[in-house]
Structure formats: structure tokens, C-alpha cells
Image (tube, rainbow, N blue to C red):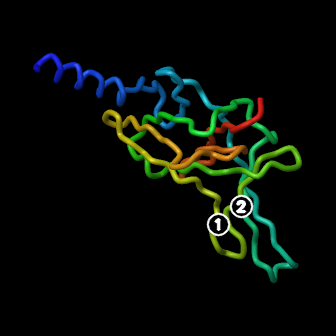
Amino acid sequence: MLVAAILMLSLQQLQTSVPKPEEVGVFYHLDNQKLLPLERQTAVSEARWRMLGFGGQRVTAWIKGERSPVRLGRRPQFVLRAADPTKYQLYRYVSKKGRREIVLAVGGRAQPMTVRCRVTEVEPQVYRFEPAEDLPPGEYGFSPSDSNETFNFGVGGA
């Protein structure tokens, strides 16, 4: 009975343990207990007036390229080493004109396209991020609320 309890505990530890990222604040894709880096870019923020100023401002953030070179499946897992995981969000980009962009606000109203994730602390200051649902094909990126740094990937297509 003691052996069975030890085996169960060991199995649970294997299921929840993940490699610890060396860099703080950097997302990695977790693939068979290996950490693989995501595409890393700095987003450019732009504000444009609509309808001669009467329609308010449209604020976007964008990164270069319509597609990330990092391609993942529909239910990827990620690992982040950070003090505060709540400042990180997963966004879905719209690809057009040689870039990927998200609309942050229109007419003063915030409207980013965030994707819900389950976040689990696997050890102190190491977190596993998993999309709450399968991701449809498209372009995605994680970004902290206090920076324009992005960690990007795509779903679908080779």
C-alpha cells in the first residue's frame, strides 16, 4: 500500500512538473517536457483619428509579418517564469498588409481580442498557461500590460 501511494505521488509530480525557464518574463511553448522559444517582437502602437476626429481615435498595436514562423497545435501549453502572471494576456491578431495587429481601443472604448487561459502555478513563480478552449487557426501573441514586448505563434498551416 505504501508503494502504491509513493507511485501515485510520483505520477502526480510528473504530470505537474515542468522545466524552469532561465529567463524571467519570457514565454516558452511546452512540448514533451521541453521548452521551445516563441517568436519575440516589440509591438508598435499607433493612434489614428477617424472621420476627421468626430469618430474618435482608433488605437492599434502591430508587429511585422503576417505569419509567425512558430506553428503550434490547437491546444498548446506555455510556461512563464514571473512574479505576477496576471499582467500577461494572450491576444489574437488580425493579419493584413504584411503585419499582424490588434485593435486596443476605438472611440475611447477598449476592445482588445484577448483569449481566456487557465493559469496554474507549477512551482514558485513558474506558471503554466493553457488556452481555455481549442484555438482556431490564426495568429496569437502573449504580451504584458506594462510593455510592448510580444511572444508570438500561429495555429494551423505549416
The reply, left or right, for residue 147 in relation to residue 122 is: right
Residue 111 disc label: 1
Q: Which of 131 and 108 is in front in this view?
A: 131
User: Most extreme residue toward the left, as rendered?
Assistant: 2
Sequence-first tag of 2 and 1: 2
* Quarter of the picture holding the N terminus: top left
The reply, left or right, for residue 21 in relation to residue 102 is: left
Residue 103 disc label: 2
Quadrant hosting residue 51: bottom right
Q: Which amino acid does label 2 sit on?
A: Val
Quick check: 123 above or below 103?
A: above
Q: Residue at x 40, y 26 (%)?
A: 18
Mark 2 element type? strand
User: Most extreme residue toward the bottom, as rendered?
Assistant: 54
Quick check: 99 above or below 12?
A: below
Q: Residue at x 88, y 48 (%)?
A: 97
From the top left corner, tell me how far across and down residue 98 is, in percent: 86, 44
Q: Which of 154 and 48 is in front in this view?
A: 154
Quadrant hosting residue 135: top right
Q: What residue type is labelled 1?
A: Gln
The reply, left or right, for residue 61 in relation to residue 150 is: right
Q: Residue at x 74, y 50 (%)?
A: 62
From the top left corner, tell me how far across and down residue 109 is, in percent: 64, 73
From the top left corner, tell me how far across and down residue 121 is, in percent: 35, 40
Quick check: 138 above or below 23?
A: below
Asked whether the beta carbons under mark 2 and mark 1 sit within 8 Å of each other, the answer is yes
